Structures are given as structure tokens and as C-alpha cells.
Amino acid sequence: MGSHHDTVGARTGMWLFLYTEIMLFGGLFVLYSAYYRMHAQAFISTGQELDTVLGSVNTVILLVSSFLVAAAITAVQRSQTKGAMALLTGAVLLGMVFLANKYLEWGHKFHLGIYPGSPGLEDSPPGRIVFYGLYYTITGLHALHIVMGMVLLIVCIAMIGFGRIQKERFLLLENCGLYWHLVDLIWIFIFPLFYLIL
Amino acid sequence: MDPHIQSYKKLGGVLGVLLVLTAVTVGVSRLDLGSLSLGVAMVIAGTKSALVLLFFMHLKYESWLIRGSFLMTIGVLALFIGFMFWDVGFR
């Protein structure tokens, strides 16, 4: 390990950043809980309008992609360069499928005239308006994180190709992986709160 | 640097459990548990995130500094949510 690579510092810094991300989404989940208490019935009935199958498929996609990224670190540690690149490519492709599903889902809702400020939604009970407001804010912010995570993973694939990430030096991959896992972690909570009728 | 290498088999096993738990939480949501359903869903989500954190994110093999600061973050978030319920509940 080169003396100019402070791996402990870099990893601690990454975790500190993850804490700010946890608080960012945590704040939105606090908002969700407060409104859930006020409009429990509306939240339950509106939640039934979301597609549970699409939500489940996206959950499986993110879990598998997280596994692929974790396995890519093992591959790098074992100097299986091609395998690591293939695993990360798989994770990026799954990220694309996730976004495609999100596009279909949002597109369908827009088609039905359900989007923030839409005339159809404005006439709904307050609980339904708040539910969709939170739905678009949280899943939208989450989708942005997916895009960012995909960019980071693509950078890692290139770095492995150039030999900048290898057996003795894979901190960048570890930190990008942590980010990807966090995005998965947040979805683990989004899924039951919005898609499963609570 | 952490020399710990997790085998593909072990990571695959963790993925298997995560997928089973996803199926369980979808199945349980179909049952009529009333006010319990939110709690059950959150316990399953908590278990799933613990698995992701411990194995995929290597938290199990991290230093006390990272493990401790992570728990503190979750503690603060729990405090926020707890105070919020306290506030809304007694209005």
C-alpha cells in the first residue's frame, strides 16, 4: 500500500457522506410518517394505485445489482479483471432497466393525469395529494441517485480497464460500491412504504 | 487495508436471503394484519438493510469508528422519528 493513499481516511470520509445521504432521505421519511399519521386512510387507499408488481421487480433488480457490485470487489481482490468488469457492467445494465421501469411507471401516472399540480390531483382529498407529492419527490430523488451511481460504476469499469483499480488498490471501487448499496438500502424502505399497502 | 475477501458463495447466499425476505414482505402485505402491518413491513425492511450493510457494505469488518458513527446516525434519525410521533400524537 502506497504511503500517499490514506485508505482509512478515504473510507471514513465516504461513510460521513453516506450519513448525510441517510439524513437527506431520513428527513423525507420523517415527513412521510407525520403525514401518514394524519392521513392514514388516504395513504392506504392511494398506495393501492401503485403497481406492486413493478415495485417488486425493481426491488429484485436493485438487490441483484447490489450483489453484482459486491461480487465485483471479490473479483478485483482475486485479480479477475474481466470478471469484475462484467459484473459491474451487469449492475449498470440493471440500473438502466430500473430507470426504464420508473419511466413506464411515471409515464403511466402522467397519462392518467396524476402529477404534482395536475387538475385531476388537485381535486383529490389532501391525503392523496400529499401521498403523490412524497411519491414523486422521494422516488425522483432516488432515481437521480441511481443515475449518479451508474456514472460512478462506469468510471470504475474504465479504471479497472486502465489498471488503476486492481488487487492492491481498489478503494475507489469500494467507495462507489458503498454509494450503490446505499441507493439499494433506501429503496428497501421506499418499496414497502409506497408500494405495499400498509 | 482490510484484506477480507468474501466468497461469491457467501454473497450469493446473502442475495438469496434478501430475495426470500422480499417475497415474504410482499406476501405479508396481502394478509390483513391491521395496524401491525406497518410494523411487520418495517422489521423486514430493517432486517434486509442490516444484511446489505453487514455483508455488501462490509460494515461487519469495519473499524469501531465507522460502526459507532453509523449507529449514532441511525440513533439520531430514530430520535427524530420518535419525537415526531410524540409531537403529532399529543396534539
Image: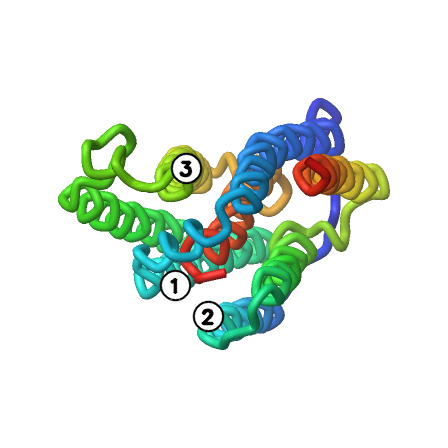
Q: CA distance from mark 1 to mark 3?
A: 23 Å
Q: In the picture provided, is A133 more to the left or to the right than B73?
A: left
Q: Position of residue A119 (x, y in %)?
A: 19, 32
In the image, taking residue A108 as reference, residue A41 lies left or right, namely right
Residue sitting at x 60%, y 64%: B35
Q: Earlier in the sequence, mark 1 or mark 3?
A: 1
Give the residue type at disc 2.
Val
Does residue B83 appear in the picture of this structure?
yes
Considering the numbered disc 1 on the image, is that residue within a helix, a strand or a loop?
helix
Nearer to the camera, B7 or A64 = A64
Asked if B23 appears above or below A3 in the picture, the reply is below
Q: Residue at x 53, y 52 (%)?
A: A189
Instruction: Using a 10 Å C-alpha cutoff, classify the residue at mark 2 as few (fewer than 14 neighbours), some (14 to 19) or many (20 or more).
Output: many
Q: Are marks 1 and 2 in contact (CB under 8 Å)?
A: yes
- Read off the residue under disc 2: B26
User: Which residue bears the numbered disc 1?
Assistant: A56
- Which is more toward the observer, A5 or A19? A19
Q: Secondary structure at mark 2?
A: helix
Report x, y in % for residue B25. Answer: 52, 69
Labels in figure, total: 3
- Mark 1: which amino acid? Ser
Measure how far apart labels 1 and 2 are at the Cα level.
8 Å
* Residue denoted by label 3: A130
Provide the chain ID for the residue under circle 2: B
Residue type highlighted by circle 3: Val
Parent chain of label 1: A
Q: Position of residue A84 (x, y in %)?
A: 46, 53
Q: Are marks 1 and 3 on the same chain?
A: yes
Q: Nearer the viewer, residue A196 or A66?
A: A196
